[in-house]
Image: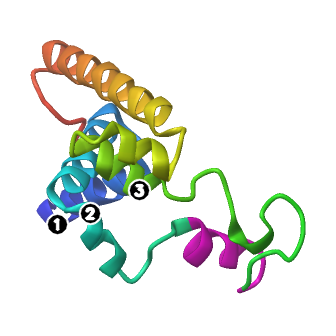
Amino acid sequence: MRIQKLKQVGLDLISFDSPQARLFNLSAILAALSAVPTDKLGYFPIRCVFKHVIFPLIFGGKCPESGIFAGCNCPGCGMTRAMSRLLHLDPTGAYAYNKMVFVLFAVMVALIIINTIRTVQFRRKTGRWYKL
């Protein structure tokens, strides 16, 4: 029974299905990006999730040759490094990597606040922190 609950929590965290999962995942992303120096992000095997994971899945193993995503250039390029720079208190460097970083950061902080409120409300209503 305990293994089933752990499996359910793991799947919930992967799916971002609950306020608790969204709060945990968004906080973990920001914590990881603030802990790892930006220059070390280039050593990870997957530098661009779009170029190395999403586009190959959608377009059969290669990037599209024409259109808005030709050569896998997308609005998200540089966002990980930009967010890392921003979390290391370098807004100029963040802006140089991706100009949308400030919008994304504001959205992430807003989602963390909203999901924290929902989690606290759930705790007050049920006496539990998690839905299991």
Q: Which three-letter amino acid code belongs to the residue tagged 2? A: Lys
Q: Nearer the viewer, residue 28 or 125?
A: 28
Mark 3 / mark 1, whichever is N-terminal: 1
Quarter of the image where one finds residue 110 = top left
Kindly identify which numbered label has been placed on residue 80: 3
The residue depicted at 40 percent of the width and 50 percent of the height is 82
Q: Left or right: 34 with respect to 14?
A: left
Q: Position of residue 39 (x, y in %)?
A: 28, 68
The residue depicted at 51 percent of the width and 69 percent of the height is 48
Q: Is residue 56 magenta?
A: yes
Residues at circles 2 and 1 in contact by the CB criterion of under 8 Å: yes
For marks 2 and 1, give the CA distance: 6 Å
The residue depicted at 44 percent of the width and 28 percent of the height is 107
Residue 113 can be seen, yes or no: yes
- The residue where tag 2 is placed is 7
Q: Position of residue 127 (x, y in %)?
A: 10, 21
Specify start and end residues of the magenta stretch as a single range.
50-61
Q: Position of residue 63 (x, y in %)?
A: 75, 78
Q: Nearer the viewer, residue 85 or 59?
A: 85
For marks 2 and 3, give the CA distance: 29 Å
Mark 2 / mark 3, whichever is N-terminal: 2
Residue 27 can be seen, yes or no: no
Q: Position of residue 128 (x, y in %)?
A: 12, 28
Mark 1 crowdedness (10 Å alpha carbons): few <14, some 14-19, many ≥20: few
Q: Which three-letter amino acid code belongs to the residue tagged 3? A: Thr
- The residue where tag 1 is placed is 3
Q: Left or right: 17 with respect to 50?
A: left
